[in-house]
Image (cartoon, rainbow, N blue to C red):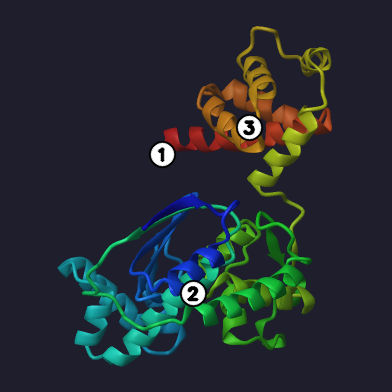
């Protein structure tokens, strides 16, 4: 049996129920942007899962659960690099962890990947009936029906948690309450998430960089908000800036744009005016707008052009151009700095 589709039209729980009922053996691959999760199914039960862009790094999990120290982890990672051996094997051979303890951590890693997967609302999937080698896999059967029940509970609860965090592009920053660490009573898990709050990383990246699953991170973020440890940053992430800019430029006519560029003091043949015109005229979505800004910013190579962007950014003539100017300036600055390294 072969199945392909997307999560917008097929519920993942329905696919898993089918694999369970028919006692299938094969691999289910689910892709979303730059992430991919593989779920290994044997006789209708999930036995293992792996993911790219692995956030639940084995070393971090081993340290988090007190199995090895930071110093031992650094030693093992250095040995892995020199001898091209997997971390799990090195940790056991150095007797820092028992095989059983390692298996438990690897199972937790796989379980976190599956629970995160069941929260995805978008993505493409492909399933193929096929036997696979279990060599090197940590095998532990997960009852699919029990998994679906737990996932349903988490989905219901995370919808409540997201009332305080409605968008994964949101950026949080520390409040003044956390300047004196001694005055705050947090659990180790809460401290680990708090350490990822830097005023720059959005919620999606905080989840990705945490050793915990997305549901657990959202619970902790809500606790930190309620405790007054973090608050939403007024600075929008690039994706939210692009979305805001796109919604605004859709309602502006070409005559208004031409007149605006004249007030900017941009000659009709100037590079910046041509770049602004292309972005505003041709962008068909927020994502396309971001791609165009990335592409067009590479054409800006003169210091004078950067200075003009900086001037426009300071003057803030009209709201619908503010975000485009800020995004373009950030990209151009990064490109210029890269050339100067």
| Residue 13, label in figure | none
| Residue 341, label in figure | 1
Q: Can you see residue 213?
A: yes
Q: Does dot 2 land on a helix, a strand or a loop?
A: helix
Q: Earlier in the sequence, mark 2 or mark 1?
A: 2
Quarter of the figure with residue 76: bottom left
Taking the image as shown, residue 162 lies to the left or right of residue 105, namely right
Q: Earlier in the sequence, mark 2 or mark 3?
A: 2
Whole-Å distance between the Cαs marked 3 and 1? 28 Å
Tag 3 residue: 289
Tell me, yes or no, whether the two marked residues, 3 and 1, touch with CB atoms within 8 Å.
no
Q: Residue at x 23, y 91 (%)?
A: 95
Q: Residue at x 45, y 37 (%)?
A: 338
The front one of 339 and 117 is: 117
- Badge 1 local density, few (<14 within 10 Å), some, or many (20+)? few
- Badge 3 local density, few (<14 within 10 Å), some, or many (20+)? many
Tag 2 residue: 112
Tell me, yes or no, whether the two marked residues, 2 and 3, touch with CB atoms within 8 Å.
no
**Residue farthest along the front direction in this orientation:** 22
């Amino acid at each position: 049996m072969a199945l392909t589709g997307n999560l917008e039209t097929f519920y993942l729980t329905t696919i898993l129920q089918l694999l369970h009922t028919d006692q299938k053996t094969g691999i289910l691959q689910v892709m979303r942007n730059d992430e991919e999760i593989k779920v290994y199914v044997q006789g209708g039960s999930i036995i293992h899962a792996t993911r790219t862009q692995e956030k639940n790094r084995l070393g971090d999990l081993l340290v988090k659960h007190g199995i090895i120290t930071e110093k031992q982890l650094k030693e093992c990672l250095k040995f892995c690099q020199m001898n091209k051996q997997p971390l799990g094997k090195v940790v056991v051979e150095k007797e820092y962890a028992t095989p059983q303890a390692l298996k438990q951590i690897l199972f937790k890693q796989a379980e976190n990947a599956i629970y995160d997967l069941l929260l995805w609302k978008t993505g493409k999937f492909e399933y193929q009936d096929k036997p696979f080698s279990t060599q090197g896999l940590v095998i532990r059967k997960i009852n699919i029906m029990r998994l679906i029940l737990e996932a349903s509970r988490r989905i219901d609860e995370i919808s409540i948690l997201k009332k305080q965090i409605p968008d994964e592009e949101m950026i949080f920053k520390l409040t003044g309450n956390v300047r004196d660490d001694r005055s705050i009573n947090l659990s180790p898990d809460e401290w680990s998430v708090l350490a990822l709050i830097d005023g720059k990383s959005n919620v999606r990246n905080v989840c990705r960089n945490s050793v915990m699953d997305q549901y657990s991170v959202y619970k902790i973020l809500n606790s930190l908000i309620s405790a007054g440890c973090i608050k939403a940053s007024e600075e929008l992430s690039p994706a939210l800036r692009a979305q805001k800019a796109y919604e605004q430029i859709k309602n502006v006519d070409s005559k208004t744009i031409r007149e605006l560029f004249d007030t900017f003091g941009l000659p009709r043949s100037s590079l910046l005016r041509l770049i602004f015109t292309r972005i505003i005229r041709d962008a068909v979505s927020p994502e396309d707008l971001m791609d165009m800004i990335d592409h067009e910013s590479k054409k800006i190579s003169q210091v004078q052009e950067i200075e003009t962007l900086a001037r426009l950014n300071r003057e803030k003539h009209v709201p619908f151009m503010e975000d485009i100017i800020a995004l373009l300036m950030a990209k151009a600055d990064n490109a210029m700095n890269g050339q100067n390294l």
